[in-house]
Image: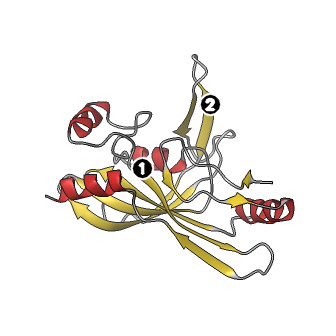
Amino acid sequence: FLELVHRLDRETSGILLVAKKRSALVALQDQFRERETGKTYLALALGEWPARRKVIDVPLHKYLQVDGERRVRVVAADDPQGMRAISLVRVAQKYSGHSLLEVTIRTGRTHQIRVHLASQGHPIAGDDKYGDFAVNRQLQKDGLKRMFLHAWRLKFAHPASGEAVELQSPLPPDLQSFLEHVAS
């Protein structure tokens, strides 16, 4: 028995939790549902992220486009279809024209980080749904072949022992290489 505990967007690399027992799956899914886990991602955002902007607390609405593609957008706080979404942002490193961000999500909405960062005027490098398409074409020429979003750190309580577990996944070689290119 192997079952995914949570999901990642197709182009997102990093930690993906898999349960080996049904009891572990249920316990871990309960932790995710109750917001008792800590999920932190590394995202390379376009532009210089303002250091004072540390919390994005804007609701999101999931909808289908005419072609059936799933999309998400920011909506007003009083929108009845909006779901509260909270992202905590910390600048890990600044580069010329880019900011490497540590983004911890307090809620787990579809495309939350992608839409939150784009709504603040700093889309994720390489994001083909919510990004800057002209900039993405140039980034592809510079070696970025996918969206720069990585599930970096995951904290949860072990489903059997209750012991605190913290997992980390280093950037994969393609993203690390692109960071080195941006830094030069």
Q: Give the amino acid at mark 1.
A: Leu
Q: In which quarter of the image is residue 164?
A: bottom right
| 74 on left or right of 1 | left
Mark 1: secondary structure: helix
> How far across and down, in percent of the image, does residue 177 sit?
27, 55
Q: Is residue 34 above or below residue 117?
A: below
Q: Which of 124 and 6 is in front in this view?
A: 6
Which image quadrant: the N terminus? bottom right
Q: Quadrant of residue 184?
A: bottom left
Q: Which of 61 and 18 is in front in this view?
A: 18
What residue did someone put label 1 on?
117
Coloration mode: secondary structure
Q: Is residue 142 above or below residue 44?
A: above
What residue did someone put label 2 on?
63
Q: Taking the image as drawn, is residue 119 in sight?
A: yes
Q: Which residue is drawn at 42% across and 44% down?
A: 119
| 32 on left or right of 103 | right
Q: Which residue is drawn at 61% across and 39% down?
A: 61
